[in-house]
Image (spheres, helix red, strand yellow):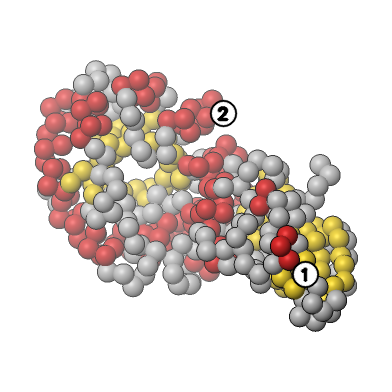
Amino acid sequence: MTRPLQIQIDLGNIAANARLARELAPQGRLIGCVKADAYGHGMLEVAKVLETEVEALGVACLDEAILLRNAGSTHPILLLEGCFSADELHQARALDCWVVLHSHEQLEIYCDFENAPTNIWLKLDTGMHRLGFELSSLDQVLARLEAKQAALDIHLMTHFACADETRNGFTQYQLDQFAQAAKQTDYPASLANSAGLLAWPEARSDWNRPGFMLYGVNPLDIETSDTQRLKPAMSMISEIISVRDLAAGEGVGYNHAWHAEADSQIAVVACGYGDGYPRQARNGTPVLVNGQMARTVGHIAMDMMMLDVTELTEVDVGDKVELWGKNLSIADVARHSDMSPYELMTRLPSRAPRIYL
C-alpha cells in the first residue's frame, strides 16, 4: 500500500458500545444490526466481534445472511425486511434465519409455504407508516399464523419514526399504540433501536436492536451522559502530500472556489470524494492535522482536498491527517456537508482499505 489513505476500524470500541447497550437494558437481549456492511465497517469482521456480545445479528435481506453463513457464522440472524418469495423462505429455513413479516403479502406467502421458518417477528405500524401491519389487523394476523402452525415462536416489533428527537412526543405515542395493541398477547416485544435505547427507557423491552450506536456515533439531537460514553469505531486517516504558499487574492483548486484573503499556506491531503469524503463539504469543514484544527478550502476533488493551515505550526509533507474519527466526530463532517453520518459511513467505497485494530 503506497497511498496513505486508510479507514481504521476499532473492533474493541464496537464491543464496548455493545456492552453499553447491554447495560442500558440488562433485562433484555440484543440484536446487533450489521446490515449495509455493518454501516460501512465490514460486516464479517464486525459480526465476529459482536457474536460474543449480542444474542442475534440483524441484516436487511437474505443476501447479507448468506454472506454471514458462508463466512461460518452460526449466530441467529434476523431478516429485518423479511422474505419476498417462497424461494427466499426456503433459503431462510435452510440457513436457520429468523424472519420478519411486515405485510399481508408476506403473510400469504408464508402461510402457503409448508416448511417455513418457525421464528417469526411481526412488525406493527405504530406510526412510522413505512412497513408493518395495521394495529387493527393484529388479531387477524395472529389467528392466521396460529391456524397454520401451533409451534411458532412469535415476536412483536415496531420501529420508531422520531426517537432521535428527544423532545418529540411522537415516540411516546408510538409506545402507547404498541402497548395497547399488544396487551392481549404475551409474545416477546422488540421496540428500541439505538435512539430508543439511549433516550426512551420505556422502549427497552425483551429484544433491543442497537445499530448506529454500536459504531460509536450519537443518534440523538442532544448529548447525554450515556451518549458521551460511546466510542467511535471508524477513523478516516490520511497524510499531507503537498504544502504551498498562496499570495493574497490567489485561488486554489477547481473553479478557484476559494481565494486567499491574505497570504496563506495551503496543504493538500490524499483524500477525495472518490474515497468517500463528501464532495459537497463546505469551505471550513474541520480536519485535524497533527491534532491541530484546520479547515477545508476549495472544492473537494476526486483524489485530493486542500486545507488552510496558515495558523498551524510546523506543517509538512507526511504529516498525519484525521478526516473523522476518535478526535473529530463524523457527525461534524456530516453537518458541514448537509448529510447524515449514516450516509457517510455506508457510502464508503472499497478503494479506501480497511485496517482492523
Q: Residue at x 86, y 65 (%)?
A: 243
Name the image quarter holding residue 240.
bottom right
Classify residue 106 as left or right of residue 355. left
Q: Residue at x 48, y 33 (%)?
A: 64
Q: Amino acid at mark 1?
A: Gly
- CB within 8 Å, label 2 to label 1: no
Q: Relative to 253, say whether 80 is above or below.
A: above
Label placed on residue 134: none
The location of residue 217, given as percent across then percent down, is 53, 60
Classify residue 217 as left or right of residue 5. left
Q: Nearer the viewer, mark 2 or mark 1?
A: 1
The location of residue 27, given as percent across then percent down, is 35, 54
Q: Secondary structure at mark 1?
A: strand
Q: Residues within 10 Å of mark 1 (few under 14, many from 20)?
A: some
Question: Is residue 354 something that shows in the picture?
Answer: yes
Q: Secondary structure at mark 2?
A: loop
Q: Which residue is mark 2?
A: 71
Position of the N terminus by quadrant: top right
Question: Is residue 8 something that shows in the picture?
Answer: no
Q: Residue at x 50, y 42 (%)?
A: 36
The location of residue 305, given as percent across then percent down, is 73, 59
Q: Which residue is mark 1?
A: 251
Q: Residue at x 15, y 37 (%)?
A: 141
Q: CA distance from mark 2 to mark 1?
A: 51 Å
Classify residue 130 as left or right of residue 2. left
Q: Earlier in the sequence, mark 2 or mark 1?
A: 2
Q: Residues within 10 Å of mark 2 (few under 14, many from 20)?
A: few
- Closer-to-camera residue (56/280): 280
Classify residue 161 as left or right of residue 313. left
Q: Amino acid at mark 2?
A: Ala
